Amino acid sequence: MNFDEARRRFGEYQKAERNASPNTRAAYERDLVALEGFLRERKGLAEDAPVPVALVDLYVLRGHLGALARTHAPSSIARKIAAIRSFFRFLSDRGLVRQDPSEELASPKVRRPLPTFLSVDAAKEVVEAPTDGDAHPAVAARDRAAMELLYGAGVRVSELSGLDLGDIDLGAQRARVLGKGRKERLVPFGEAAANALREYLALREAFRHPRTGELDPRALFVSVRGRRLNVRAVQLFVRAYGAQGAGRADLHPHALRHTCATHLLDGGADLRAIQEVLGHASLSTTQKYTHVSVEHLLAVYDKAHPLARGKLPKVGGGEG
């Protein structure tokens, strides 16, 4: 079997059986095309000649990944190894290759950076920034409602963009979101988010397209042209409000999600509950927030405890 046919079958499997997102499928496709290109070059095959998957062995994989390691971070290499393993496991399980050459691949050690998060005061400043400026009232209300959900409900930016009007229950203060793998979950949000959503919905008609009158009948958040608000637009205004509210021009929507999780944990929420709110498939993903809280705890200790820096407080009166 050549690479073209193998990639086609693997792509169909990812979509139909694994329910992988378009972004994941596209990333895996790029990784496999790169592997095919490396193999073609190593074996001296013509540009238009089919490349048999059977030519791939452990040494080819090591050579390919070694070449990539010169220009890619360990985290990127680890993801490419995951794509290659998944591809060959699929082929092996279906008897399309005699042996899985990826079984003996070792993954690079990846040091996960701690998630970025804001303090409670900084988060409040950022979330309230839309209505503290001079933006159009409808735009300010929309952005404030979106920020309240990003921080208050911990939703992903793609989940926020995908919300429909029918997904919001203001009375019960919860939203139905479509997460990774097209899995639905219900997420709660607080009174502040509910009030912000009510204010925005009262002004939503102002987003009709100025010439055509178009207004998406389903989308919760819409642009000034009446269309569903896209992920890029949310990223841009989060960055702007991050700079305005907390002096953080590098702020991104995922940082608000991290902040939500960290503050829930600091407030005493159970890890399992946080896992449900965030929609993590594995508890280990949620556990990274415990490290953030420990870092925060150590910072507070370092500032406040008299023995933190090995210095005893001065006391008067002697021993008597």
Image (tube, helix red, strand yellow):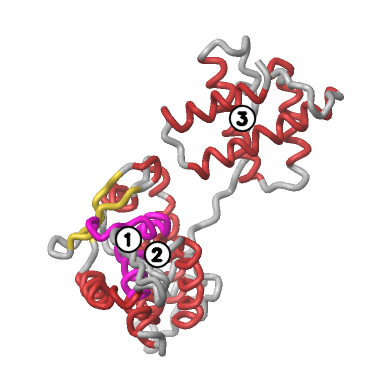
Residue 103 at x, y percent in the picture: 60, 21
Q: Which quadrant is the C terminus positioned in? A: bottom left
**Location of residue 197 in the rendering, given as x and y in whole percent from the top left corner:** 25, 71
Residue type indicated by callout 1: Ala
Could you say which disc has been placed on residue 84 in the image?
Answer: 3
Q: Position of residue 134 (x, y in %)?
A: 41, 90
Is 264 situated left or right of 38 in this image? left
Question: Is mark 2 in CB contact (under 8 Å) with mark 1?
Answer: yes
Q: Which residue is mark 1?
A: 219
Residue in the image at 51% along x and 15% along y = 93
Crowding near the residue tagged with mark 2, few <14, some 14–19, many ≥20 C-alpha atoms within 10 Å: some
Q: Residue placed at 41% from the left, 85% from the top?
A: 135
Kindly identify which residue carries mark 2.
Answer: 227
At label 2, the amino acid type is Arg
- In the rendered structure, which segment of residues is drawn in magenta? 142-167
* Residue 119 visible in the snapshot: no
